[in-house]
Amino acid sequence: MKQFSIPKEVTHVTEKLEKAGFEAFLVGGCVRDLILDKIPKDWDVTTNAKPDEIIALFDKTFYENDFGTVGVVNEKTEDETLKIVEVTPYRTESEYSDNRHPDSVIFSQKIEDDLKRRDFTINSLAYSVSQKTIIDLYDGQKDTKNKLIRTVGKPIDRFTEDGLRILRAIRLSTELSFEIESDTEKAISENSHLLKNISKERIRDEFTKIIMSEKPMDGLLAMKKLGILKYVIPELEKTFGVEQNKAHSYDVWEHLIRSVQLSADKNYPLEVRLSALLHDISKPESRRWGKEQDAWTFYGHEVIGARTARKILTNLKFPSKVIEKAVILVRWHMFFADTEQITLSAVRRMIVNVGQANIWDLMNVRICDRIGTGRPKEDPYRLRKYHAMIEEALRDPVSVGMLKIDGKKIMEITKTNPGPKIGFILHALLEEVLEDPKKNTKEYLENHIKELILLPENELEALGKQGKQIKEEVDEEEIRKIRGKHWVK
Ligand code: ATP
Ligand code: MG
């Protein structure tokens, strides 16, 4: 058997339990990942010790759930996946009368009981760190090798116990690129309604993992095939077969799943992926035949779409920060598409609409949208141009506002009344600071104005004019640099 490398923070936990006379195994996702040569996202230990016995063994733990799971805290590591090692007593589960929660959690003394309650064969493996052996009661290693998701025991029973397992099967098959074994798959498509009983939070967590995987499109296609979209985002079903115009190769559904796939290929964050998936969600109800255009029109679909996206994401209990951002991106996703109207001042207004923090993500949604049509016009110049325009609009212009002193302070120190002199002084200072930015300190400037104020008015005016001209030159040079960087005029 191949050697697994287990971090010392984890072996510390299993060793300590065994030294105290208990059994201890790594279990679930981490064993599966070790076999697949993937780095586990978290490490779970299972043991015949009870929660109070676990707590007594370690310096720092926490225990705040109904499942007996004790978190063993490692404060010394920087690695997020090792800060907490979860230790759970062997459990056996009683009846599930509501299709989602075991009626009570019963601890057991036998590892076999614990492995039996786990969802899929690939998740039911246990590994003894000290013995270097795997316990494999359900051919989990074989299924891992054959890339198959198969329930432990009869699929229908296991899905009836906990309907979330339906979505977990799809999530795991998406993340791992595994097939769902045919009996398991059949049970899913015949019993998808069991997802109705599952809390939105649990559905959201699995759905988020699908969207954040490398292949969200595969996950969404599997959800469609097995008929479970209606229990997650029913609105997506309305986009099936909704044809668009010649600029598009695909119907709305396929355009959306291709867009979200592109957002994953580019490793964009959750909000961009969600808006890539939802940006055209209201095209079905906005579609009208345009006689003049002799084509379909979708006027206002981004406005209705933003409302629909909010409803969908709120229903799935996403955090409000995620919802707000995704909704903004859906609402304004048409901006960069409308190539005629994009001027620098339009870009400035859009930055006000979406907020500085979101403007680049809006561009990124646009990129996914554009390539997701399947017929992208070759247009890299335009994209580079928009990049340059955003940078230009976000840039602080070169101005006396950059100085660590203002007109009011100058009048106060020099005891001068308002008048053109103050402007001359500011611009004279600006020239010096542009020449040597280190001079932009309160101290230097406040001292220096005492010398400037003594100059005759005409000399001061000349200095000020010179400063103004240099300011304009430097400003233009900055804009030239931005455009040059993006290879646009
Ligand atoms: P990941 O690598 O994404 O964490 P995972 O398989 O570890 O995937 P978790 O949600 O962390 O998923 O669950 C840990 C383990 O607990 C699973 O491997 C499985 O053995 C078991 N498990 C989780 N959820 C269920 C469930 N609904 N029914 C039965 N067993 C479950
Ligand atoms: Mg896990």
Image (cartoon, helix red, strand yellow):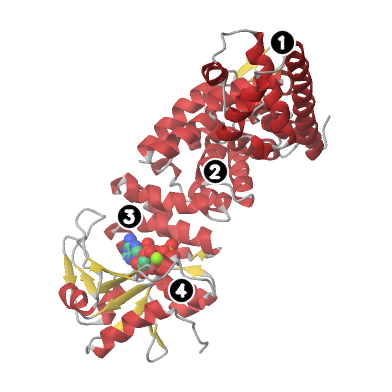
Mark 1 CB near ligand 1 (8 Å cut): no
Mark 4 CB near ligand 1 (8 Å cut): yes
Callout in the foreground (1, 2) = 2
Could you tell me how far apart the alpha carbons at marks 3 and 4 are, in whole angstroms?
Answer: 22 Å
Q: Disc 3 or 2, which lies upstream in sequence?
A: 3
Count of numbered tags: 4
Q: Disc 1 or 2, which lies upstream in sequence?
A: 2
Q: How crowded is mark 1: few (under 14 residues within 10 Å), some or many (20 or more)?
A: few
**347 relative position to 406: left or right:** right
Mark 1 falls on what kind of element?
A: loop
* Residue position for label 3: 163
Between 294 and 378, the one nearer to me in the picture: 378
Three-letter code, disc 2: Arg
Residue 358, compared with residue 334, is above or below; it is below
* Residue position for label 2: 273
Callout in the foreground (1, 4) = 4
Between 9 and 102, the one nearer to me in the picture: 9
Q: Are marks 1 and 2 in contact (CB under 8 Å)?
A: no
Give residue 13's quadrant in the image.
bottom left
Could you tell me how far apart the alpha carbons at marks 4 and 2 are, in whole angstroms?
Answer: 27 Å
Q: Is residue 141 visible in this depiction of the protein?
A: yes
Q: Disc 1 or 4, which lies upstream in sequence?
A: 4
Residue at image point 48% right, 66% down:
181
Three-letter code, disc 4: Arg
